[in-house]
Amino acid sequence: MFKTWVISIPGPSATRLDPLAARLRENAVSFDIVPGVDGKLLAASTYFELAKPYYEETNRFMTPSEVGCALSHLAAWKAIASGNEPFGVVLEDDALIDSSYSQRLGSLLACREICDFFVSLGGHEDNIPAVRKLRGRPLANLQDIWEVCPADFTSLFGAVGYLIHKRLAERLAEMGTKRLSIVDDYARHYRNGVLKRVALTNIVGHPWGNYHSHILGESRSLLTTRQMYHNPLAKRIVTEIKRTIQTRQARRRDIQENSEFSPIPWVSHFRQPD
């Protein structure tokens, strides 16, 4: 019914796959490896060619690690789309799972509604301030699985583990082939009609303090460089004030329009798998 794909960059860092591989075998889950792409090793011309379309659309630079991450997940989406199973599970190689993984995943797959969802399996521990803002509604009668309010997709980060149907994999692969995008830019995928519904659960964990460390480091470095050469302090202050006002106004409108969604009660209590 489903196949599991694990993204792992070949080379010295490949050993971090070992704990996850052992856990998957304990859960009697077979898996295939998707060779990850180290964005820092891309030629400068290749990096800029891949990152330029996303910048032109969003006015935001993708870092080299984000480009590598996007290429890695794109390969996983293509593998799911070309496979024979109706569902695919994608895990990054530092994902944490426990002995209940297979049982909880099986319960999730038994839900017919799940075909329409991008199901984030968890791994949001280092983004607690952001995910506390998430609102949702229970999905069917499943425990700890909520449909996320579309207006809150901007507060949902991470792609350490997720479940998608083959049809969604095809749409994601088509999107990524035409224009590479940051993997966890769920709001953009929704605006472009690729994602329609997102569900959130906590079957998968992520090491504390390790969330996208390369990506965050590069982002801070890139932001510092851009501020130094292109963003005078006064302009930044005015821009941030305008953005804050717009965000608050949009939030008030959104609360009125999405009254059927409520705060997800367990979202700030992610457990670390045993």
Image (cartoon, rainbow, N blue to C red):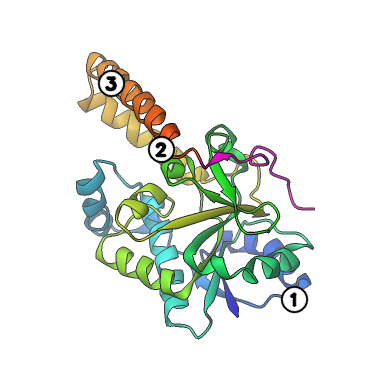
**Quarter occupied by the N terminus:** bottom right
Q: Nearer the viewer, residue 263 or 14?
A: 263
Please determine whether, in this image, residue 96 is positioned above or below residue 154. below
Secondary structure beneath label 3: helix
Q: Earlier in the sequence, mark 3 or mark 1?
A: 1
Please determine whether, in this image, residue 171 is positioned above or below residue 86. above
Residue 185 visible in the shown view: no
Majority secondary structure of the magenta segment?
A: loop
Reading the image, the residue beneath label 1 is 28
Reading the image, the residue beneath label 2 is 257
Q: Nearer the viewer, residue 82 or 248?
A: 248
Image check: 43 left or right of 78?
A: left
Residue sticking out furthest to the top: 234
Q: Any magenta on residue 267?
A: yes
Instruction: Work out how far the residue at label 1 is from the one at label 2, CA to CA, in angstroms.
Output: 44 Å
Reading the image, the residue beneath label 3 is 242
Q: Earlier in the sequence, mark 3 or mark 2?
A: 3
Q: Quadrant of residue 73?
A: bottom left
Identify which amino acid the numbered label 3 is placed on.
Lys
Q: Earlier in the sequence, mark 1 or mark 2?
A: 1
| x and y, in percent, of residue 226 in the image | 27, 31
Identify which amino acid the numbered label 2 is placed on.
Glu
The residue at 49%/55% (across/down) is: 198
Q: Any magenta on residue 45?
A: no
The residue at 31%/18% (across/down) is: 241
User: Mark 3 near mark 1, Cβ–Cβ under 8 Å?
Assistant: no
Q: Which mark is residue 221?
A: none
Image check: 90 left or right of 96?
A: left
Per the rendered image, the range of residues in magenta is 260-274
Q: Quadrant of residue 224?
A: top left
